[in-house]
Image: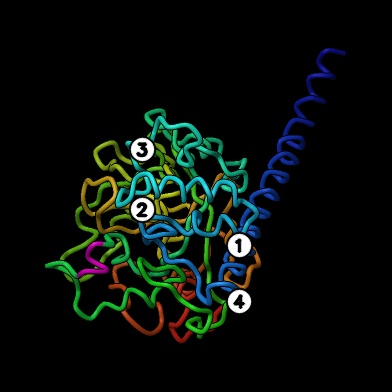
Amino acid sequence: MIAIIGILIALLLPAVQAAREAARRMQCTNNLKQFGLGVHNYHDVMSNIPALWAWGPTCHLTYVSPQVVTLPFMEQSATYDKWLSLESRYPGRYAENWAAYDLPDNPLTEQVPYMHCPSNGNSRNPSPMFDFAGTSYRPSVGDGMWHNNEYYIYWGGSDYPANARVHSRGAFSAIYWKGFGAFTDGLSNTVGMSEGCNGTEYDDPTVKAGTALVPTIYNGTTAVPLDCFTTVRDPANQSIMLATRRATGWRGLMYSDGRSIPSSFCTVLPPNSPSCMYSQSGVTSWGVFSASSFHTGGVNVMIMDGSVTFVSETVDCGGDFSRPQAVSGESPYGVWGASGTPSGGESRSL
């Protein structure tokens, strides 16, 4: 009898686990739909969508994410008002204002329910070093990798490609507000946001949640993700990156920080591929950052028309990651790359 009961439990347990994951995945889908609704409500009022990062609501905090400025459009006005209060007390400070960390009613530490995918268990507190409210969701910067040091993007750096058109390569751009009219490939053909795994530390060693250090990813003129795709995994365990290649990516650490390294993703490498940075830096480095989730086989993404779809790890990415990224026109990264560009001249849906 005991043996029979054991067999029944062994048979039922996978089904129970599958049912629970199906429920978690549905919640993640609903959260992305909420973001889509918030972006559309924001556009209805402002005639554009939020910038990837910009100054705060009254221009007194910097690096503020789309997740912050859409709060009042997603029935979170009370939390948004706390950001306004923080701005008034600490004008000119970063969105992750360290000085305000221990203050009562601090929006930095206040969890927003729809920021968290229940399959991503660490997103409520992604690092034991901090108590900031994290996020399971990342805005899309399209198929460009020059997006990931916004100082160079906006002001232009010594190695910044003069002909780069970074604002055209993704739905969200640093200090740049797009109207729906800029989505000439169609809102229904453009990815806006994806799930993203968060690690237990800001230099997490796992492929899905961590970030690898790959100095060859940027050679001064073109970004090359090939090494990120092929060489950062541990041969003995493909879910772990090589210890010598770990970097401080800060992925998902703060939902309030809109800078690309901690908060965005690229439609270059397939979902659940490694994320890689050019230099060992917490928030300012060239890189390619992948969509990821703890669902089996792929990730949920929010399309800019407000719908949500599941994208497989086997989505077409062009097959040749040695090619330089595009600065205009069609993406070199297949259907996945094309889905990230709002105006690349490709009307290819996922």
Q: CA distance from mark 4 to mark 2?
A: 33 Å
* Mark 3 residue crowding within 10 angstroms, few (<14) / some (14–19) / many (20+): many
- Which residue is pictured at 30% across the width and 52% down the height? 92
The residue to which callout 1 is attached is 38
Which mark identifies residue 341? none
The residue to which callout 4 is attached is 188
Q: Is residue 105 visible?
A: yes
Q: Is residue 287 above or below residue 4?
A: below
Q: Position of residue 291 (x, y in %)?
A: 47, 56
Q: Earlier in the sequence, mark 2 or mark 1?
A: 1
Q: Position of residue 300 (x, y in %)?
A: 59, 57
Residue extent of the magenta highlight: 151-155
Q: Is residue 127 above or below residue 25?
A: above
Q: Earlier in the sequence, mark 3 or mark 2?
A: 2
Q: CA distance from mark 4 to mark 1?
A: 16 Å
The residue to which callout 2 is attached is 61
- Which residue is pictured at 40% across the width and 77% down the height? 331
Residue at the far top: name it. Answer: 2
Q: Earlier in the sequence, mark 4 or mark 1?
A: 1
Q: Amino acid at mark 3?
A: Tyr
Q: Nearer the viewer, residue 135 or 211?
A: 135
